[in-house]
Image (cartoon, grey):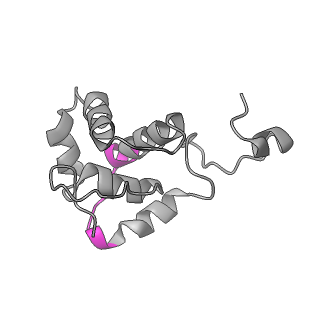
């Protein structure tokens, strides 16, 4: 099913990287790696699973995240079997929402300075 007018007008020309069906336009994993290069993260498959989850969440909510608690809870629920919040903070020590959104090419939600969610800087 086409998601945007561009998909309708130009079918089959989607620029989303393979494996990232909900990626923002123009984003690539290389862009994400560059965005978090200063954070000292050693990226593995678990980080990219969180990226996919964040991109899907933003796509399903039309890139409008107004409730940070809901986003945090959705991530925690999605990764509950792996350890939830503790697991996410092991992957992203400066905050799964902040670091995850930067890696995923998503706009970090404004006013996001609660250390429990990860601080913006």
Above or below for 52 versus 102: above
Q: Where in the figure is residue 66, as x and y percent of width and height?
A: 39, 43
Determine the residue positioned at 21% across, 59% down.
Answer: 94
Work out which quarter of the rendered image holds the C terminus and state it: bottom left
The residue drawn where x is 18% and y is 39% is: 85
Question: At x 48% / y 57%, what residue is drawn?
Answer: 105
Q: Is residue 51 left or right of residue 16?
A: left
The x and y percentages for residue 60 are: 51, 34
Please indicate whether residue 99 sits to the left or right of residue 54 in the image. Answer: left
Numbered label tally: 0
Q: Position of residue 12 (x, y in %)?
A: 79, 41
- What residue do we see at 51% from left, 45% from top? 63
Q: Would residue 43 be visible to someone looking at this image?
A: no
Which residue is situated farthest in the bottom direction here?
38
Q: Find residue 2 and report its image quarter.
A: top right
Is 24 covered by the magenta stretch? no
Which quadrant holds residue 36? bottom left
**Magenta span covers which residues?**
38-48
Q: Quadrant of residue 114?
A: bottom left
Q: Is 27 rendered above or below residue 38?
A: above
Q: Is residue 40 magenta?
A: yes
Image quadrant containing the N terminus:
top right
Q: Position of residue 31 (x, y in %)?
A: 50, 64
Q: Is residue 16 above or below residue 41?
A: above
């Amino acid at each position: 099913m086409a998601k945007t007018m561009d998909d309708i007008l130009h079918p089959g020309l989607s620029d989303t990287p393979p494996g990232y069906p909900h990626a923002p336009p123009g984003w690539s994993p290389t862009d994400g790696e560059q965005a978090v290069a200063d954070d000292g993260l050693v990226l593995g498959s678990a980080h990219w699973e969180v990226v996919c989850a964040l991109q899907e969440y933003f796509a399903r909510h039309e890139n409008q995240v107004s409730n940070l608690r809901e986003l945090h809870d959705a991530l925690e629920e999605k990764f509950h079997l792996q350890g939830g919040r503790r697991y996410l903070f092991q992957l992203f020590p400066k905050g799964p929402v902040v670091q995850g959104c930067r890696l995923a090419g998503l706009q970090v939600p404004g006013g996001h300075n609660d250390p429990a969610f990860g601080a913006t800087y």
